[in-house]
Amino acid sequence: MKNIVLIGFMGTGKTTIGRLLASRLGRPFVDSDKKVEHENGMTIREIFERHGEAYFRQKEKDMIARLSRYNNAVIATGGGVVLSSENMRRLKKNGVIIALTASVETILERTSRRNTRPLLLDFFAREQIVDKLMSERYELYQKADFSIDTNGNSPQHVINEIMLFLRQAGYLRGRG
Ligand code: S3P
């Protein structure tokens, strides 16, 4: 069975939704960022601080190459995974791509609780940065097989919508 791959901007809920979706489907859940952190013995923030963004992107690319060879998993990716067409080609080859979306306000609200995201550390420039990155990436997220807005929707609702899509598109056979 193909993987189910969640893409989307920071703060759209990929990890939360991914974990719940995996447990609903009885499939393994894997989080690309968490695996990169684990294997490097550092947080994403530390990787950015010590080695820079380009180094992180290479680690992310290596991880995506490995995760793309999985079967039957629910995979949560980092928000910048779409920046590499090679990442997307690999993920698509053995997976169905689901994009989670949210408004800039919602993203700012959700990402303000923790200081774990190196791209959003400048408190006063956060809105401007999110706006800029969002407009740069918008079209890349649009390339997903299915897209679902998480604004004001409960995780349960988002999961139900994803399940409906997966069933209708023939990715599930009588399960879930
Ligand atoms: C990034 C998103 C982060 C993480 C890194 C870079 C991005 O993941 O990979 O901080 O470029 O959008 P989340 O989307 O899980 O926050």
Image: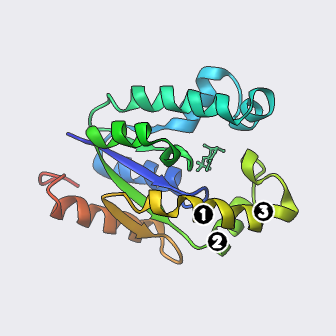
Rendered-image quadrant of the C terminus: bottom left
**Circle 3 is placed at which residue position?**
126
**Circle 1 is placed at which residue position?**
134
Above or below for 41 versus 145: above
Q: In which quarter of the image is residue 91?
A: top left
Element class at badge 3: helix
Q: Looking at the image, is mark 3 or mark 1 earlier in the sequence?
A: 3
Q: Looking at the image, is mark 1 or mark 2 earlier in the sequence?
A: 2
Would residue 30 appear left or right of 118 to someone viewing this image?
Answer: left
Q: Give, as a three-letter code, the residue at label 1.
A: Met
At x 20%, y 39%, the residue is 1
Q: Does the residue labelled 3 lie within 8 Å of ligand 1?
A: no
> Residue 135's x, y, as percent?
59, 65
Q: Give, as a three-letter code, the residue at label 3.
A: Arg
Colour scheme in use: rainbow
Q: Is residue 94 visible?
A: no
At x 37%, y 56%, the residue is 98
